[in-house]
Amino acid sequence: MTPQLSFFLENAWIVPALSLTAFILNGLFVKNINQKATGVLALSLVGASALFSYKIAFDYFSLSTTGEHLAIVPVDMEWLSYLPMMKAKMGTLLDPISVMMLVVVTTVSSLVHLFSIGYMTGEDGYGRYFSYLPFFTFNMLGLVLAPNIVQMFVFWELVGLSSFLLIGYYYQKPSAVSASKKAFIVTRFADLGFVIGILLLGYLGYTSKLPLNEGASILDFAVINSAEFISMFSEIDSGVFGLSILGLALILVYMGAAGKSAMFPLHIWLPDAMEGPTPVSALIHAATMVVAGVYLTARLFPAFSGAASALEVVAFVGTFTSLFAAIIACTQDDIKRVLAFSTLSQLGYLMMALGVASVSVPLGFTASMFHLFTHAFFKAALFLCAGTLIHAVHSNSIWDMGGLRKKMPITHMAFLIATLAIAGIPPFSGFFSKDEVLAAAVHGHRPVIAAVSYLVAGLTAFYMFRIYFVTFFGKAKSENAIKAHEASISMTLPLIILSIFTLGAGFIPMNSLIGLQPLTQHGIDYMVAVPATLIGVFGIFMAYLFYIKKPNLARTTSQKLGKFYLAAKNKFYFDEMYLFVTKKIIFNIISESFAWFDRHVVDRTMNIIGSSTVGLGAIFSKMQTGFLQLYANIFIIAVLVVFYILIFQHI
Amino acid sequence: MTVTSTIPLSYWLILSSALFSLGIYGFLTRRNAIGILISIEILVNSTVLNFILFDRYGLVPKIEGEVMGLLVIALAACEVVILFAILLALFRHKMSVNVTKLTDLKG
């Protein structure tokens, strides 16, 4: 029943191709000719891809009027063929979540490009920056459109690479270099689980002997999510922690997702990733790349819901991360770090919402995708605001800012709108999506998860308004904050656009667009929304009390909390723990012994072989006297010996 | 062609062996490279003689042995030319063709 597809749906591959073009042109040619032109070129191509994807979204959602949106695969090229049933393919997949992500990625990316033109002016490596940024966009779009797990994995690694390149953009700064390495190694480590998960899924698909359609591969998401595949493996015991074999494979895949989405305990790379330029943080480490893990989990959601234990892991890790990160966010001084921990907390929310959903009650799935959508806009807005603030004040610390409300009115408005959205105050977009997330937790009959979610909602409002009050109210706390003024149009325009998105995104009827099955119109559940809003308002009031009304209260409270406050401020010493494990245990005990073995056994053997060859050579070279007639003598004697032997053999 | 010579083969072989031995003796004892060269020529000629002899005194006398002999002589001539060229270059460089002094290839 596939209807006639429009040109835009057929050729969805053009969206990533435009970014790739920008990357190739900028990286190879334009960068060397005219640095200024790279920004304009990248912006125009990525902007074109954004318009293209809006048209795709429009066409896609108007395909069906029944409210059920089928997945379509317009392009599916064979790339590597291992077996007739096991192929790695490259293609495009259009379904509600991929189309939504397409819109999010291209929108945020083009706005970040626009912002960067102002923000990066005068930086060294301007052209390099504008080669990497479209490169990232291309990879992210390839990931979003992947119709099979192999393509997803390829682009998964490529976004990791571009994230690495952009975090390490200031490669002369040691902290940036170590942050980029940290991000790369931690996510790579997590991807180890992903690879094993893919192998396990491929093996399961191979043994299943499922009847496949012509051209289909067992690595296609459609096959992994099919009811036959799930029912075949969800009952078989894997022998590991009593998981089903499907659950084990999915938990391994989820490990990769948790690494990319910085779930506890793999969250350590994300705060450090803030060493990159702020627009990069907005694009990669807030709006798009970090939600790739959530996206992957959502992609495999039917399979996950067939393995309740795996989904349970997703829910609890998500819940814990959201609380854990929210507590840390209340204590940080670096504005970008607060936002980074806020991102962690919100990602935990997204994962939690997925975890409490099921195929029969898919509210959490829709809620997660809806919150992902709104979060991308308001978090990008917050990061870009942080960018303009840092640009104006030349410091990341909120205690160097202050009183910027009048000096930077546009930034102030955008920041306020985005902060109200993340705090879940109606009618901003975050209210609607957070309401759905909370409703999913409440209706999923998970009292603990629901309670933690409410608590996190309050904490979110508190720490966001903490930085809002400290930066925009009170007295200017540094020389630069006194002289601060509003940024250029290229930087404020994206803020204005994102504010409009933040205001409007909540009114998009996500329920009817995204879901595993057509949902009945959910609307606002007042039993959920009213307490949530009250908690949010309470959080805001607390922040007001602590940071405007009675500044001493904050100090005394933190002193009263004592050790706990200090632990939260030091991110619960997780970096130190990792350093202890890697440096003290892995480096000292394991690596040292390997190094000893390498140096004293492997190397020494090789050295002995080498030096004995040299020694033998020295001995044999003594035979070369240089006397011609001595050689001739030896030769003749040898000939005589041979002669003698030959003759006496015959006799 | 019938064998017309009355000299028995053994005489010829003794001559050939004598030449060969002389050649080897000269090759091993001469200090002068030119002398060595001459000794080599004697060696080569003793083998040429053998070629012709075994052809002539064979069961079915043929012409191939003599042809082979001619070829070897031509080859030896070429060899001499090349060796002389080398010796000349060597002489220019070292002002000597005494092989006991040319020990640069000592290991």
Image (cartoon, helix red, strand yellow):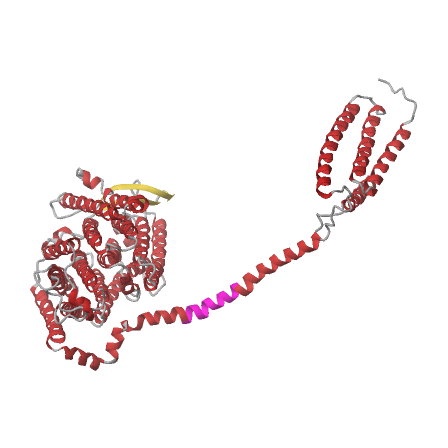
Q: Quadrant of the N terminus of chain A?
A: top left
Residue A293 included in the magenta stretch of the image = no
Does A427 sit left or right of A313 as displayed? left
Q: Nearer the viewer, residue A348 or A49?
A: A49
Q: Residue at x 82, y 41 (%)?
A: B30
Residue A585 included in the magenta stretch of the image = yes
Q: Quadrant of the C terminus of chain A?
A: top right
Q: Nearer the viewer, residue A598 or A383?
A: A383
Q: Nearer the viewer, residue A627 or A157?
A: A627
- Return the x and y of residue A613 as percentages of the image width and height: 64, 55
Is residue A262 at least partly visible in the picture? no
- Return the x and y of residue A300 as percentages of the image width and height: 26, 54
Residue A260: quarter of image: bottom left
- The total number of labels drawn is 0
Looking at this rendering, what residue extends furthest in the top direction? B1
Q: Nearer the viewer, residue A196 or A11?
A: A11
Is residue A535 at least partly visible in the picture? yes
- Return the x and y of residue A225 as percentages of the image width and height: 26, 51
As drawn, A38 above or below A409 = above
Q: Which residues are magenta?
A: A584-598
As drawn, A8 above or below A607 = above
As drawn, A232 above or below B71 = below
- Return the x and y of residue A40 as percentages of the image width and height: 22, 47
Q: Residue at x 83, y 30 (%)?
A: B50
